[in-house]
């Protein structure tokens, strides 16, 4: 059996202290840090389109339509940041159009102010004229 490789998202810079916290073994002899590196948050499950391949668009999501408040986001992010040192990025999308969430850019700024990268996916309907892209870039 090959000697296990100790890594942190593909890097060999994992500290022994990380292992002492209870590393996970993924079945192939590779150990990962114990904290999440990415947090996926759904700012809203509302969408302006009706794509048949999407649970939201097809009307089969089985959850009431709603947007996350900025305070909810702050609470979730603060929990994910404890213990510090693991979280690196926040993904802001799932089953909805993120730009329909009125607090999306505040969420981006809050995450960026804590040194986190942010990612989203959009149907592009709200990107006209570059205003949203510019505001997103300025937010973080």
Image (tube, rainbow, N blue to C red):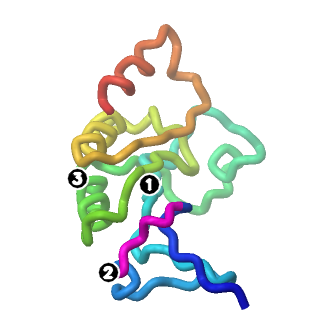
- Tell me the mark number nearer the camera, choosing from 1 and 2: 2
Q: Which residue is mark 3?
A: 71
The answer to which image quadrant residue 104 occupies is top left
Residue 115 percent location from the top left of the image: 28, 46
The relative height of residue 57 versus residue 81 in the rendered view (above or below) is: above
- Which mark, by number, is residue 17? 2
> Would residue 55 be counted in the magenta stretch?
no
Who's the residue at 40% across and 83% down the image?
A: 19
Question: Please, what secondary structure does the residue beneath circle 2 have?
Answer: helix
* Residue furthest out toward the top: 129
User: Which of 51 and 80 lies nearest the eye of the viewer?
Assistant: 80
Q: Is residue 128 left or right of residue 109?
A: right
Q: CA distance from mark 1 to mark 2?
A: 29 Å
The answer to which image quadrant residue 5 occupies is bottom right
Residue 125 percent location from the top left of the image: 57, 23
Q: Which residue is mark 1?
A: 41
């Amino acid at each position: 059996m090959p000697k296990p490789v100790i890594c942190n998202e593909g890097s060999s810079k994992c500290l022994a202290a990380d292992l002492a916290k209870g590393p996970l073994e993924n079945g192939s002899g590779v150990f990962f840090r114990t904290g999440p590196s990415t947090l996926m948050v759904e700012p809203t499950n509302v969408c302006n389109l009706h794509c048949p391949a999407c649970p939201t668009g097809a009307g089969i999501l089985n959850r009431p339509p709603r947007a996350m408040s900025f305070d909810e986001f702050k609470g979730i992010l603060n929990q994910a940041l404890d213990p510090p040192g693991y979280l690196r990025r926040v993904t802001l999308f799932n089953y909805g159009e993120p730009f329909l969430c009125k607090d999306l850019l505040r969420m981006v700024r809050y995450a960026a102010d804590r040194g986190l990268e942010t990612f989203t996916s959009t149907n592009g309907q709200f990107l006209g004229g570059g205003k949203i892209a510019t505001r997103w870039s300025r937010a973080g």
